[in-house]
Amino acid sequence: MADHEHGSMDTKVQEQTFASFMSFVSRTGIIIIVLLVLMAIFIR
């Protein structure tokens, strides 16, 4: 059986992509919450 070798791949691009994705998701979530609060206040 072959010996296991720890990965040597550069993960900088993956880390940047994940950071961008998390930023997008958090901003979108905040916008949705703000819109829901505004709808609850003004649409009665």
Image: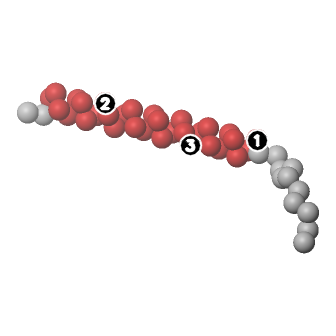
Q: Count the numbered circles shown.
A: 3
- First reached walking from the N terminus: tag 3 or tag 2: 3
Give percent across and percent down for residue 17: 65, 44
* Three-letter amino acid code at the position of disc 3: Phe
* Three-letter amino acid code at the position of disc 1: Lys
Which type of secondary structure does the marked residue at label 2 adopt? helix
Circle 2 residue: 34
Circle 3 residue: 21
Question: In which quadrant will I find the C terminus?
Answer: top left
Give percent across and percent down for residue 33: 32, 34
Circle 1 residue: 12
Give the number of the disc on residue 42.
Answer: none
Give percent across and percent down for residue 31: 37, 34
Give percent across and percent down for residue 1: 90, 72
- On the image, which quarter does residue 29 sit in? top left
Crowd band around label 1 with a 10 angstrom C-alpha radius: few (<14), some (14–19), many (20+): few
- First reached walking from the N terminus: tag 1 or tag 3: 1
* Three-letter amino acid code at the position of disc 2: Val
Crowd band around label 2 with a 10 angstrom C-alpha radius: few (<14), some (14–19), many (20+): few
Crowd band around label 3 with a 10 angstrom C-alpha radius: few (<14), some (14–19), many (20+): few
